[in-house]
Amino acid sequence: MNQELWNEFCDRLKQAGTLINDVSAPQDPLTQAEGYRYLTRLLRAGLESCVEGSDPRFPTFYSLSHDTIKIGNDNPDNYYLNCCVSGEYDYVINGEVGEVEYFSVATKAGSYATTGDMQPTGEISSSELNFNEDGSFTILVSTTQPTDTSLYPNWLPMARNSDNLIVRQYCNARRERPAQFRIQCLNAATANTLDPERFAELLLRSVGFVEGTSGLFSNWINQFKQHSNQLPANDQQMCIKVGGNEKIHYHNSHWRLAEDEVLVIEPEGIPECEAWNFQLSNYWMESLDYRYHQVTCNNQSTHTNEAGKIVIAVSHLPNPTPSERYPNWLSTAGHSEGGMLFRWIEATSFPPVNTRVVKLSELT
């Protein structure tokens, strides 16, 4: 590591900022400020994943999506955990189930910092796990399935090129206590010390994460503008390729509303499923701040209207109608456009999600 490499790191980070001021991006002060904040958030995530938590011999869980780091229409109903692993080693995960109804653990190959995608190499969900009587569980993570199931009753496959894993815990309310996870590498014998040459490589990889992530989802939101204010089903393989869950059916899109307009969302039906939810995001595909604004709803929080249907309304302004007519009223939190996503989780079918834009006065 030397001054020249540090300068390269700083210069590449500076160059990443040109994306925010691109002609395709909104130029209003809020979107621009959020864009630069987004880059600082991605840098924090990149340093955590590519530098601090990057040694697969000494794995540790961290989170690339939470209240103040948000990536790719992150789910407000999820607790996310990430971890660096390697198909060259074997791992054991020990945990205690919390209050969430559903979680999944998946191994992936690739990242936004290197290959630009995250190919699935294995997955196991809480509905498939064997739990102990006290709610604890053990998962072996390896390329070879264990023969002794009494020692390792749960197996999460890896491939030789697997290099990370993702935990998704789906909760209906973020007051729920999440499950706890600990991970240990079973066959790494070397000491954990800083390698100067390796550190230089990892530092540059962290800014590669900023470049790759911001570029990927900038391309996505520009694609979604082609069906703005609609929620067609996505190319599911496109979503899975960048780390999406194979058991989730995605409807990513873009929304844009004038001050006096309302986006009305109505799925044609609700299939048998583990859960479903809808969320609003900003232009950079960060979920809007669910800590302070009502920007998401799910199968537990929504109410049927007076006609017995699930109808969701998105508006800049408060609900002017009786609550029985539009009981699921979401706020744009001061934004004029952004991303949005409807998810079906472990659903038996995927009904279309219909939308229409109406004037606020038409609802009163």
Image (cartoon, grey):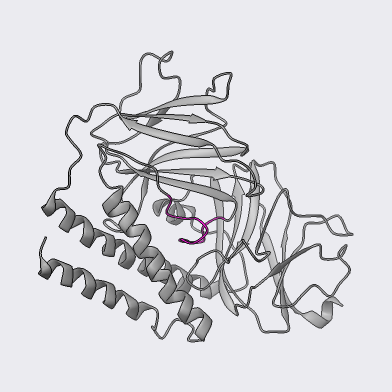
How many discs appear? Answer: 0
> Can you give x and y, in whole percent of width and height, for residue 303 in the image?
80, 55
Q: In the rendered image, which quarter contains the C terminus?
A: bottom right
Where residue 169 sits, quadrant-wise, is: top right
**Residue at x 63% of width, y 37% of height:** 99
- Answer yes or no: is residue 306 visible: yes
Question: Is residue 161 found left or right of 288 in the rendered image?
Answer: left
Left or right: where 326 falls relative to 93 = right
> Which quadrant holds the N terminus?
bottom left
Q: Nearer the viewer, residue 50 or 312?
A: 50
Q: Quadrant of residue 341?
A: bottom right
Image location (x, y in percent) of residue 154: 45, 24
Point 89% across, 68% down: residue: 322
Position in image of residue 145 (x %, y %) = 35, 23
User: Does the stretch in magenta take in 13?
Assistant: no
For the record, the magenta segment spans 63-75
Residue at 31% over, 67% down: 211
Is residue 111 at least partly visible in the picture? Answer: no
Horizontal arrangement in the rendering, residue 157 relative to residue 2 (left or right) = right
In the image, 65: left or right of 317?
left
